[in-house]
Amino acid sequence: MEKKKICLCVGHGKNAWGRYDPGAVSKDQKYHEHRIAKKIAKYAADYLGCDLINHDGSLCLSERIKAVNAGSYDFAADIHLNAGGGTGTEVYYYHGSPTGKRAAEEICRSISETMGVKNRGAKVRLNSSGRDYFGFIRQTKPCAVLIETVFIDCESDLAKVKTEEGCKKCGIAIGKALEKALYTGAKK
Ligand SMILES: [Zn+2]
């Protein structure tokens, strides 16, 4: 089976007006979603040997989507941290995509088991017109998922990705999950 061409993308970094977009921040304001996501994404991309988009935080969302669509990828994953008072890991996938669902389930399982956090599962989120809610999933050509690794506003979740070692563990967990879902016997 041919290897699928994957790209990983770091969430946030720059907003539509060209300013720094930290994404969500920890309760003490010390930790920024973008900064943690970029470390995790780097370890995952190194593990897979795949392209990494927006590691320097220089692209806003529409530019990140454009970069993904210019790359003839088979699969794209956008890496984030969650916020809003929950705990654990969840992954959104393009509705109706079996490959997206399988990858999302593998990533959830891998992060949950490796990091010791709750598995909130693979999810689909649609907007009021019945299309995928997240622009990164809706507007990208390849099959796309959006990974909400852990909650930045949950102390016990944050503790697992505060350190370089924690980011490495999480990144490799994502890499291994994608390798399993996309490189071994995966069907279109
Ligand atoms: Zn985010």
Image: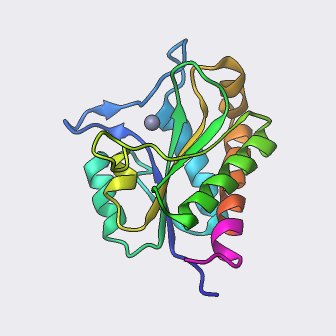
Quarter assignment of residue 26:
top right
- The residue shown at (62%, 56%) is 44
How many numbered callouts?
0
Q: Name the residue nearer the viewer: 118 or 71.
A: 118
Q: Is residue 13 left or right of residue 75?
A: left
Q: Where's residue 163, x and y in %?
A: 69, 33
Q: Is residue 109 above or below residue 36?
A: below
- Residue 181 belongs to magenta span: yes
- Residue 3 belongs to magenta span: no
Q: Which residues are magenta?
A: 180-188
Q: Is residue 13 left or right of residue 74?
A: left
Q: Name the residue nearer the viewer: 40 or 150.
A: 150
Question: Please, which residue is most extreme toward the top here?
Answer: 28
Quadrant where the image shows the N terminus: bottom right
Its colouring scheme is rainbow
Question: Please, which residue is most extreme toward the left here?
Answer: 17
Q: Is residue 140 above or below residue 154?
A: below
Q: Quadrant of ligand 1?
A: top left
Quadrant where the image shows the C terminus: bottom right
- The residue shown at (42%, 31%) is 23
Question: Please, which residue is most extreme toward the bottom here?
Answer: 1
Q: Where's residue 49, x and y in %?
A: 60, 69
Q: Where's residue 130, x and y in %?
A: 33, 47
Q: Where's residue 137, x and y in %?
A: 40, 53
Q: Is residue 35 above or below residue 109?
A: above
- The residue shown at (36%, 63%) is 68
